[in-house]
Image (cartoon, rainbow, N blue to C red):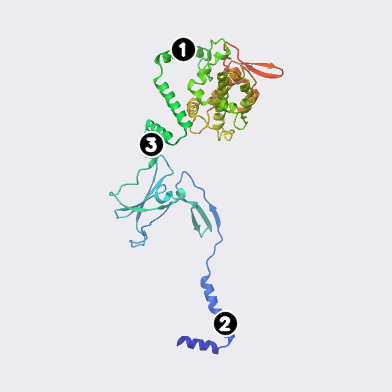
Amino acid sequence: MAKHKEKKNLEDQNPSEVEGKMGESTKKKTKKKKKETHTVTMETIAENPNNISPIVGYFPSGYDPLTNNNDGVEELRTKLYRNAKRNNRLQLVVSPNGSQVDFVGTNYSGEATSAQLCTYSLGILDKETQTLKIVPIAANKIIRLEPRVRGLEAQETEDPDTAKQELTAEERNDKMRELTQKYSSKKTIRQARKLDSLRQQEDTGNQEEFDRNIAGAINKEALEVAVATDSARNIPPHDLDATKPQLAYPLDRIISKGEWDFLLDIFELTEAGAEMTPDLYPSFVCNRSYKLEHIQDEDEKKRLAGIFSFITHLVKFKDKHSMDGVSSAKHHKFPGILSQKFTSMFSISDSKRLPEEKVTLLINYVLVLTLFADDFRSDPSDIAKDLRINAVALRPFYEYLGCKLVREKNVVLATLPVPLVFPSVRRKRRR
């Protein structure tokens, strides 16, 4: 009845009066809806590795920390644990006061491992200074805190990485061998078998041959120490008493017998009639590929093609572990036996960069092999381009190897006179 009366009263009143009352009511509503606005300056704070960022977590069990206390806030003890080996792994433990239940969450297991398509940040508004600070949260994860009874329930399941670390090297090799036999191609299986046989030969070895090599090495070491005084020469294996250039740097001590089977790529490419492109092979190899076509003896052709292939792998290995040539070696495939040999020979560090003295050693290996490929009269211009060194700056490397530079028809050639004579080490005078 009251509603009908109100309708009648509104009908009896003038339209202008009704509009006035409606306007007053809308004004009151707009006053209620009016929101407080601030003109603030935003400041984005980057994550500092020395300080821990804010940690955000939530309780999926429905637990509310703002209850069970006279002040409206329950006392909580919060602890944060960081993995000693992987400092980006965090574990958050929230313990309510007087309770046997802990709330535990991590940023590397459970819900945290699911796909994440956004970035989380925490905004802090200071009304007095009119500033809004945006801070990244720890690990960019909102941690799910699961309840656990203290003392009764074990911690998180063991990290699978730790289980992998417990495997010995032999067990890992056995597993890799099984996977290779099951899922790899026939070519890869053959290469793996050859590699295993080479390792067994190296392990067992002929003791008499080993003794002979040691005896020979002792004499050569004595000669090398006499020449190089207090520092060993950073060059490939050599023989100071050699009477031929081919014996001054023995090729079988640079490329071992078992490695030749993995250096047939250029030989097979030549037999198929395909061309070598500069983006896959060094210019030194491409400019001398015609030599393979004129060799009739198959063994001699395989030998020269193997030297070209070994030079290619050395140049690509240098590019792979340098700043300026990493793109050229991005898709290059190294045989496993050569990859292991180069890594141990040139001492790759954790930074994946070659030490300065190992770069020199690698360049010396390349230059010696170029002498073999050019019958010990080599033009250094194209190999200098492959090594990303000025041709003039490459001349001291040849001289350090005992080479002699001669000029023929306005072209500088590197030759190798025998017996080897190394330049004396120049020492600066002390004042």
Q: Is residue 231 visible?
A: no
Disc 3 + disc 1, Cβ < 8 Å = no
Q: Residues within 10 Å of mark 3 (few under 14, many from 20)?
A: few
Q: Nearer the viewer, mark 2 or mark 1?
A: 1
Residue type, mark 1 in image: Gly
SS label for mark 3: helix
Residue 239 percent across, percent down from the top left = 52, 13
Residue type, mark 2 in image: Gly
Of the pair 328 and 95, the residue shown nearer to us: 328
Q: Tell me the CA gap for discs 2 and 3.
A: 82 Å
- The residue carrying mark 3 is 165
Q: Residues within 10 Å of mark 1 (few under 14, many from 20)?
A: few
Image quadrant in which you'd find residue 86: top left
Residue 242 percent across, percent down from the top left = 54, 11
- The residue carrying mark 2 is 20
Of the pair 223 and 92, the residue shown nearer to us: 223
Q: Tell me the CA gap for discs 3 and 1.
A: 41 Å
